Amino acid sequence: MPWKLNVLTVSIIVIFVCASARAETAKNLFYERSIYTDEYGLSYYPDYPPAIGETITLRLRTFKPAQKITIYSDRDLKIPMEYRQGHWWGKFEIPGDYKDGGHFFVVWIRYPGHVLSKSVVWYQAFKEKISAEEESIVSLYEDIIFTEAKESAVDAEEETISLLISTEGEVMSPEASPLVIKGSQSISFKTRTLEGSKEGYTAGTTQSREETLRVNISGSTAGTDIDATLYKTNAIGVSQVGENEEKISILLKRASTEAYLGDFTADLTEAEFAKLNKVLSGARVRGDYGQWGFSALYSSPKGYSKFSRMYGDGTQGPYKLGYSPVVIDSERIYLDGILQSRGEDYTIDYQAGTISFIKKIINTKSVLNIYYDYRQTVYQHATYGLRGFIKPRSGIKLGATYLDDSDSFVGAQTIRSSMSQEAFDPQSHSVVGVDGSFILDNIAVDGEIAYSANNLNILSAASTKESGRAAKFNVNSTLGPLGIDMHVKKIGSSYRPIAEPEPKQAVWEYSGTLSFRPGSLFGGKGNYGYEKYTQRGIVYENIYKTAGFQLIPEQLPSLEYNFSEIDESNDPVTGSSIKRVITKNSTEMIHQIGFLSGSLKGTLEKWLSGSLTKEATNYRKVNVGVATVGLDKVTFSSNVELENRQEPGGLQPYRRTYNLNLSATPSKQYFVSSSLNKIVDSLQGNTDVLDLSYRAQPNETLKTDGKYTITSVLEEFSATSEAVSKQAGSFSLDYRPIKAIRLRYLYKPNFTRIVRTQGLSYNNEQQQAEINIIPVQYALLGLIYKLGNSYSIYKSDSPNYAVKENSLDTNSILYTIKMAPFQILSTEFNYLVEKGDSRTLSSTQEPHTYTQGRDVGNKFEAVIKSSLSEKFSIDSRYTYQKIDQGTMEALANLTDTKTHTAALKGIWNPQEIWTFSLSGAYSRTTDYLLSQITYTFSPGAGIIYHLGDKLRVDFEYTYSKSYSGATTEKSAYSLRTKYALSDFVDLTLRADREISSSPNYRLTDITGNVEISL
């Protein structure tokens, strides 16, 4: 079968070459002097090399369709790129203070499917036009420099578009401005005292206090930019255990020097062996002065480094990391070698130590590598590092790094002797490394050597001490269209990098790549790589072989062929011996017409496993994709993968994968965003992931919006963990046929489906319909009708999970009339009818029996508000409520009550600063089950004093007494004061006291808050 695919590929190549040869030779385009990578070609216009100080036009052509491209200069200037006529165009004015020689652009490309790529492109710029002889030298230099750029593009996936710090010239500070200080200090306290007993409260006195300080200082003084933030909290609660949190960040910038104090992520990543990239708390200083630079840090880590590797389970998660809580921002998650972005690709629960993916299902062949910090420290710990580099001449860069990550002697002996379980000794760890890169004539060379020392117990002179070495060497050579890359790496069995919990050791690795790209039409590449290493005590040995070519004629479909073979000795997750060879042959055709691109890809894949008896699994895959290119208001990408496989046992299962991403905002009235990932597997069943939201308002009378999500996760049941599909939505439709009528409908589905049984384990569906009519200017008629249906299954009913544990069906209708017939009078009348039927599992053994329940409620409410004058108003309210609750056939054997309530409140404003109120309420409750009538009287009074925005005092008193089989009496006092001591200080104090004689208790709450704002 593979030879048939190869014959087809060669035939298509011949057709394309013949069809495009004439068109290519007839053109004389300026971009023939383009710089090419594996992803794109970048052209400079009108001439290359460009002159310093002139404005140049950049034209970029990607070899695969891209949805967005952004370019940054080496001074962090953004160059917007616009798509037209099959290319991306942008303009850049080369700064007049640039030096002769090499400069670079950082190119960010967003491909369909939210794939982000980053690469660095070097170019030459001179103050004057150069001669033809010099130009040929520049051309040779350009070929060499660009090889380095292609290496930079290998690890192109990044979480965010982090801007590049300038490496040429000074960083210009904003115009000096006075320091601006903003902040607030808040002190709050609460005291609660209960004498006697009250349901839901604890007797005695409880106190809590919390202090919060926020300060921000920003601006510029004496040529130094300052941005400082202080956040500090201190809380003491009921348990008398204080909780303290303090965050300080101070950033100082002066010319090319930067100092930072606070929490930060160490970004010492220029070297491979002597690198540090974890969350720290301390100080960092760095500077870049063109020909030399440095970076230094002294800090304490916020946790221990941990590593977790696992296969996907066919769901979105949650995937447990193993340790929790996790240090915020410390995680780095790789899915099949691609770095994932938090918020876009996954969410993380730092407290529980779990991650869940947002828009995709992680299949069982995908490998997750997760690096994170476990938020726990035992010994006092310090991390410090220093890195410096120099550029003695153009094309040469030398660097050195020293890192130390060690426990402290201080208190270590006491802490170690107090450990009872899982005791571990304090350790010291340091790494020193030297690296360099050279570009000479037609060869680019870079290398690194490093040494590590690890003391496994600093408390013992006879402790085990480990030391190791590591080295690597890379050579890149470009002769015209021909490129040669060679890579060698050797790591000793005892070498340990900093902050790598389970590093690869005893590494022997080498690879070679041969590439050929004479221009934009054709490119080819082949690679051979070998690696052997030890990790977790297991020896891995792998061989990698790849080959491929691209045929990319303009205005015609492109063709790409790729071959790869991976020979693995061990399973990458479990480490078990598998002796597996994975061979792939794929051919892809891409064609772009206007703003649409389409792709067709065929893949033959063979997994051959086993040491003695070989077992082969054959895959046949076809991918069809469509995507938009260069559109701002609409981005769309879709892909369908059809997979058939033949397993060693004779089974021939299939798998269908459908992916769709759409985001469109054609106008302010319309918006839609959708992400769909659907998998149909003949063995594992169907899984779906959907995130849909939309908004539409075609005219002033009609409006609709909605959101619907589907997530595939694991859920714990009594006996098993089951893959489930959780689906929830919210939809609304608002229609106003005429000004006096408004119709509205709301629908909220929410259910959980068990994938294995396809049955629902939970369901909660809510519907609501509304109608509002305005027959005259000062009147409104309204009706709201609600329906509810919910149930949940009995989770111990394994394995079928078909028995319902409880269910509830509800419906209600609310009638509303609002009127304001006069300027001094407004009225509101509401009538609510509620009904509910429930079933609760009472016997878990077959035959299952249920207890039925019924709820019926009727409530009428009348509210009248009148303003008899500008200083006097009266509010009145009457409520009637009937509640019936019953079980089985009885309608009211649990609750059968009827309540009448009348309330009246008068408000008098004799002066602008004074407000007085008197209130009274009466209620009569009849309990037909107890044959008891309860009367309650509740008089009250209130005073409000307010002096503008300076002072406000509110006092309320309510007395309540009930007469029934037992008399209850309660008095409630409330005093609230808010005082602005100045423009920056506010004081708030509240005191509430409740006194009851039956039951007998006294409850006092006192709360206060002081807010100081700058």
Image (cartoon, helix red, strand yellow):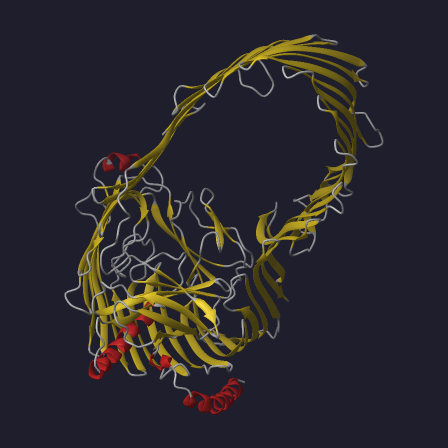
Location of residue 249 by image quarter: top left
Residue 214, percent from left and from top: 36, 33
For the residue pair 532 and 620, the one nearer the viewer reads as 620
Viewer can see residue 454: no
- Left or right, 500 with respect to 323, comes to left
For the residue pair 414 and 269, the one nearer the viewer reads as 269
Location of residue 804 by image quarter: top right
- Left or right, 877 with respect to 196, comes to right
Residue most extreme to the left? 392
Residue 877, percent from left and from top: 73, 19
- Left or right, 769 with respect to 298, comes to right
For the residue pair 791 and 16, the one nearer the viewer reads as 16
Residue most extreme to the right? 889
Quadrant location of the C terminus in the rendered image: top left
Quadrant location of the N terminus in the rendered image: bottom right
For the residue pair 92 and 515, the one nearer the viewer reads as 92
Residue 284, percent from left and from top: 25, 47
Residue 884 vertical placement versus 994 (above, below) = below
- The residue at the point 28 percent across, 48 percent down is 174
Viewer can see residue 652: yes
Residue 957, percent from left and from top: 59, 11
- The residue at the point 85 percent across, 32 percent down is 889
Residue 9 vertical placement versus 750 (above, below) = below
